[in-house]
Image (cartoon, helix red, strand yellow):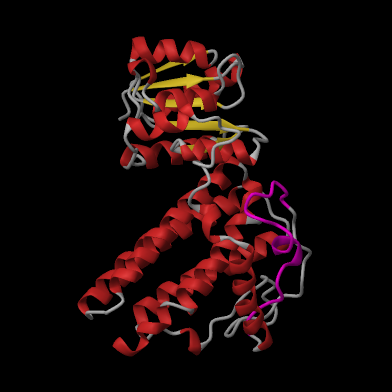
Amino acid sequence: MLEKCLVVDDHEMIRETIAIMAKSQGFNECITATDGADAMSKLYHERPSFIITDLQMEPIDGLEMLRLIRSGRYGLPHDIPIIILTANAAETVIAQCIAFDVDAFLVKPVNKQSLQDRISQLSQQAKPKKGIEHYFAMYEQDPAKSTAFKVNGTVAFTDDVLKEVDAVIHEHKESGTAEPMLANATENVTPSSTEHSSPPPVAPAAEEGQPESDNRKKFIKWQDRFTVGHPELDQSNKELLSIINDTYDLVVTHHEGNEFDDIAKRFQHYVEDHIELEEDLLTDANYPRLKMHKDMHARLVKQAEFVILKCQADPGFYKTDFFRLLRFWWVKHVVQEDTKYKSLF
């Protein structure tokens, strides 16, 4: 995997700096290209195993380059890992990049640790790619008219579903287990909205077992009625609750930067560990709804991948889409679905 990296950017200093950073991460060789057209030539002749490219370039930008590669144009390897560098990219462009299975995003200016994390992750497990025919068919469509990229994250977050999720959270609030909903983060904001509004701070709720001096802001407090009947699964769900509360604290205190990335990593670890543990336990218990539960897991994982990629491209989505995803997961999966198997344990 870490044989030869192609770095594409139309700014020489950025291009050379990223190439040096990438080389330090273990690539045997790093080559560079000045734009998408130059990159396509380098791809054909040099055959790199990894690409890091800017999004906004002329005459061929990063999105068009991604589309050309994935659709198998010019006989190029269509499944090569690709990281796209972004700065103030439109949400529709981000969605199209995700539809063509970009492997990761990095926000400019590029942080060395973030680059290392992305390269390390992809070198261990690259994102699965579909067949060339799938991407070729998408490429033939006019992106402005195509709905092919409206997948994963936009399906579940309808207005009706968000209202249902918020109603359950409101019920928790009425029982003293949750903070008021964040109006600016949830009202009049659809999954396709490009606004990244920050909610106003609200008074924190002291969590059970926490001293009043703990000024971290809590969104939901753990209650015995959230138990699913198994101590390991309860502990796993408490980690999700901690992730929700930590995200809430960052949102209402207007934090920026790497704190959100750290929470996203925790959430990814939670998803992997929780699903493996839960499916093993439910299989052993002969849970009659196991297939339905696994199908829900598959949809949620797809949803999470979509949202986290959006957040990589634009951290502003942590305050909207990512926080919605966490609330959706808690209400629709933990509270409404997981508690159905409580009697098994």
Q: Residue at x 66, y 56 (%)?
A: 190
The answer to whether residue 184 is visible is: yes
Looking at the image, residue 117 lies above or below residue 8: below
> Could you say where residue 263 lies in the image, as x and y percent from the top left?
53, 57
- Prevalent SS, magenta region: loop
Looking at the image, residue 223 lies above or below residue 122: below
Q: Quadrant of residue 73?
A: top left
Q: How many marks?
A: 0
Q: Quadrant of residue 297?
A: bottom left
Q: Which residue is at the far right? A: 200
Q: Residue at x 36, y 12 (%)?
A: 44
> Could you say where residue 342 lies in the image, as x and y percent from the top left?
36, 86
Region of the chain picked out in magenta, as a range: 177-196
Looking at the image, residue 343 lies above or below residue 272: below
Quadrant in the picture for the N terminus: top left
The answer to whether residue 184 is magenta is yes
> Could you say where residue 207 lies in the image, as x and y percent from the top left?
61, 81
Quadrant in the picture for the C terminus: bottom left
The answer to whether residue 15 is magenta is no
The answer to whether residue 113 is visible is: no
Out of 297 and 107, give the one closest to the viewer: 297
Q: Quadrant of residue 24?
A: top left
Horizontal side, residue 131 vs residue 262: left or right = left
Out of 130 and 233, give the one closest to the viewer: 130
Q: Residue at x 41, y 12 (%)?
A: 42
Horizontal side, residue 332 vs residue 186: left or right = left
> Could you say where residue 221 lies in the image, as x and y percent from the top left?
58, 80
